[in-house]
């Protein structure tokens, strides 16, 4: 756990060779599985993987996307993992290229640091998932204000955990939040499908909001981030 440290977002770009054809739905669960299955090979990360706590990393989808939604067998794709944890980044960098599951084989792994710029907006590449006490889609049990409040509460928790700082919760994180989806976006998780949303956040121009936005690139927004929910794209001012 960091104590008021300068934190860095590491992005690990992994090229993989597909051993099977994958639907987009299956690919979205096979990437977290690919990462999990390398974590459990190390005693420390096996424990980390098993713990019910904030993981501080997130994964995106295979790209390039296929127009017909089918990722082809024996073709090369890439995906990204982002984390605030330098040791985890180094472990993944060293091990993912030699790793295989029945669905994919790691080929080349690169790492880069995302620079801290002044963010105009962040947008979700994979859907945001918000768990509710009622175990239902948030629109069925929360108002928009309550939904935003829950998103912020989750971010403050991550901010405390990953920076060691106490946030000023009276400061805004975003000036506006825009929904980019008409209907619900399905998110496969374990053996069920959860309802999610695609969001665009216009980041407030205060130092703390900018720091939270930078953190979000690694931690995501909402829940299930290490399962691939809420991987963020970004645009600098």
Image: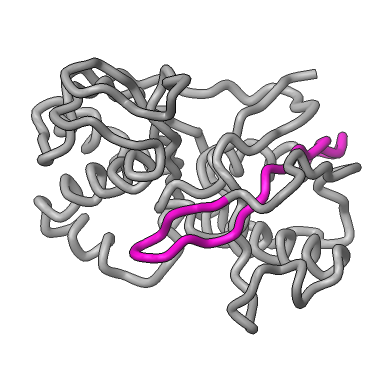
Above or below: residue 216 compared with residue 171:
above
| Image location of residue 176, percent across then percent down | 89, 43
Say which residue appears at 82% left-offset and 70% top-offset. 146
User: In the drawing, does residue 94 fall left or right of residue 236?
Assistant: left
User: In the drawing, does residue 232 fall left or right of residue 73?
Assistant: right
User: In the drawing, does residue 41 fall left or right of residue 167?
Assistant: left
**Visible residue check, residue 6:** no
For residue 99, which quarter of the picture? top left
Above or below: residue 184 compared with residue 209:
below
Image: magenta residue range: 186-208
Say which residue appears at 83% left-offset and 42% top-offset. 178
Q: Is residue 109 magenta?
A: no
Say which residue appears at 33% left-offset and 39% top-offset. 27
Q: Pick the residue in front: 192 or 214.
A: 192
| Image location of residue 52, percent across then percent down | 37, 72
| Image location of residue 229, percent across then percent down | 51, 49
For residue 234, which quarter of the picture? top right
> Split into 4 quadrants, where in the image is the N terminus?
bottom left
Magenta residues, dominant SS class: strand
Say which residue appears at 34% left-offset and 37% top-offset. 23
> Split into 4 quadrants, where in the image is the C terminus?
top right
Q: Is residue 197 magenta?
A: yes
């Amino acid at each position: 756990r960091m104590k008021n440290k300068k934190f860095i977002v590491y992005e690990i770009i992994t090229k993989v060779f597909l051993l099977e054809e994958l639907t987009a739905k299956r690919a979205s669960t096979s990437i977290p599985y690919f990462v999990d299955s390398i974590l459990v090979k190390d005693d420390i990360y096996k424990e980390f993987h098993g713990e019910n706590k904030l993981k501080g990393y997130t994964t995106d989808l295979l790209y390039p996307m296929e127009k017909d939604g089918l990722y082809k067998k024996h073709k090369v794709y890439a995906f990204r993992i982002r984390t605030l944890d330098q040791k985890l980044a180094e472990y993944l960098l060293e091990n993912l290229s030699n790793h295989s599951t029945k669905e994919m084989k790691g080929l080349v792994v690169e790492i880069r640091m995302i620079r801290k710029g002044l963010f105009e907006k962040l947008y979700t590449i994979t859907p945001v998932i918000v768990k509710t006490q009622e175990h239902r889609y948030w629109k069925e049990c929360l108002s928009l204000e309550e939904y935003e409040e829950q998103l912020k509460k989750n971010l403050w928790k991550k901010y405390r955990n990953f920076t060691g700082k106490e946030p000023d919760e009276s400061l805004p994180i975003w000036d506006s939040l825009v929904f980019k989806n008409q209907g619900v976006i399905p998110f496969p998780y374990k053996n069920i499908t959860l309802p999610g949303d695609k969001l665009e956040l216009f980041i407030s121009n205060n130092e703390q909001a900018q720091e939270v936005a930078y953190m979000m690139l690694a931690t995501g927004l909402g829940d299930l981030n290490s399962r691939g929910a809420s991987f963020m794209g970004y645009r600098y001012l």
